[in-house]
Image (cartoon, rainbow, N blue to C red):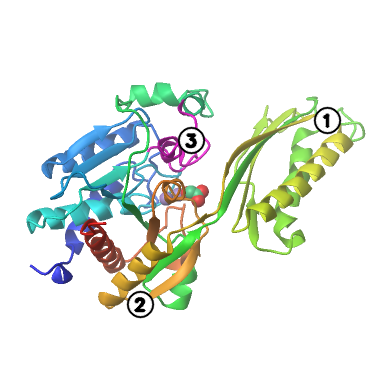
Amino acid sequence: MDFKDLRVNGQRLQGSLEEMAKIGGTPGGGVQRLTLTDEDKQARDLFVSWLKELNLEITVDEMGNIFGKRPGRNNDLAPVMSGSHIDSQPKGGRFDGILGVMGPLEVLRTLHENNVETERPMVIVDWTNEEGSRFAPAMVASGVWAGALERDWVYDRTDIGGKRFEDELIRIGYKGTAACKKWPVHCYYEYHIEQGPILEMEGKLIGAPKGILCLHWYDIYLAGEANQVGPTPMEGRHDALCAAAEMILKVNQLPGRMGGNMVATVGEIQNYPNSRNIIPDKVHFTVDIRSWDDEHAIKAWELVRKDFEDIAANRGCPIKIEETWRVEHSPFDEKRVQLVLDSADQLGYSSLHMVSGAGHDASYMNQVCPTAMIFVPSIGGRSHVEVENTRWEDCEAGANVLLHALLQSANEKL
Ligand code: GLV
Ligand code: MN
Ligand code: MN
């Protein structure tokens, strides 16, 4: 069969996504499958059972990354790879991450049932903890695999309840024995929903990002002085939550002050003791800064950091700042991005060259091998929410682009 005529089975892809959406399904129609929870384990088990049906060579490494390898005609050649993540945000959607795992699974099923051989081997991957919501930071397991993060530093990260990453990995039975260490990869494609409004606004079906913005994460800890709210005069208070409130607005105003080209967000906060009649004496909040221009993001941070220190001093609330994580902006391989655009074109799909504002394991993979991504539209531009949605026919179209990009790459002899 001429592989130009090959197409994935859209109904089967929909079925896999619907099966996965039952695991951690929320009443609001979303998914809550936080990394290294029982739901993550259940979804991993299902994924592994599907890999076994295809007789793939399955490896689980010491970060819990799951790889399934399909041999090629020449197994001395570096494989092509595709994957994403099974974990989700709290009250997240049914597509973020899992589409990029079920998509290549559908590609492999299509090759299997059509007895298609490729020159190079193909590898499908589920990366552990892409979201970084339960255990910060994000994309840690592709980061360790790429050599950008230290395994033991990640093992010691804790969730809000004090549970260690490594202990939870062991608890769900996914601390494998293989070293988490990069090997030669010919190229990597990650299939994902766009998570923004651009494709829909432009009326295009397939997005081919030229790269991913930088991501900088910070953790801020403030101390105050707790007291009874009634008898304590307003003057002389050391209210850690009020200090945080001023700081949060500074973060929100930062992109405007910097003249744009960036976004800045506080998404998480803990306030202690969190009682309506006690002045707060301990606050933790997070800062997320993203831009295509790393220097611009760092300058913005320096500006807001100075604001934080001034506010903390004015309110008499000692501040501790942790510069938790930085991943540089990732310009993808132009040849691979072009191959995605060409594959879309050959399949008769409209396409758009764009930028990814969301973080992806493709950022770290881009440090290892030529990398590109395939986006399909997010309805209403909504993501990381229960109403996150993408049309089934769009999921199928993106998987067809992935099929063709993978097939072409897997048949390259050089
Ligand atoms: C990953 O989901 C991100 O924060 O962009
Ligand atoms: Mn994702
Ligand atoms: Mn996400």
Report helix, strand or loop for mark 3.
loop
Are there few (<14), some (14-19), or many (20+) residues within 10 Å of tag 3? Answer: many
Are there few (<14), some (14-19), or many (20+) residues within 10 Å of tag 1? Answer: few
Give the number of the mark in front: 2 or 1: 2
The residue type indicated by label 1 comes to Gly
Depth check: give the residue in front, 410 or 287.
410
- The image's mark for residue 211 is none
Find out whether residue 134 is within the magenta segment. yes
Residue at the farthest front position: 414
Q: Distance between the residues labelled 1 and 3?
A: 36 Å
Lower sequence index among marks 1 and 3:
3
Lower sequence index among marks 2 and 3:
3
Q: Where does residue 294 sit, x and y in percent of width and height?
A: 63, 53
Q: Which residue is drawn at 11% across and 41% down?
A: 55
Which residue is the site of mark 2?
350
Which residue is the site of mark 3?
134
Q: What is the span of residues highlighted in magenta in the rendered image?
A: 128-151
Secondary structure mainly formed by the magenta segment = loop
Q: Is residue 282 visible?
A: yes
- The CB of the residue at mark 1 lies under 8 Å from ligand 1: no
Looking at the rendered image, the quarter that the C terminus falls into is: bottom left
Answer with left or right where residue 352 lies relative to residue 83: right
Which residue is the site of mark 1?
230
Q: Do the residues labelled 2 and 1 touch (CB within 8 Å)?
A: no
Report helix, strand or loop for mark 2.
loop
Q: Which residue is drawn at 49% across and 30% down?
A: 150
Q: Where does residue 355 sit, x and y in percent of width and height?
A: 50, 64
The residue type indicated by label 3 comes to Arg
Looking at the rendered image, the quarter that the N terminus falls into is: bottom left
The residue type indicated by label 2 comes to Ser
Q: Residue at x 42, y 57 (%)?
A: 387
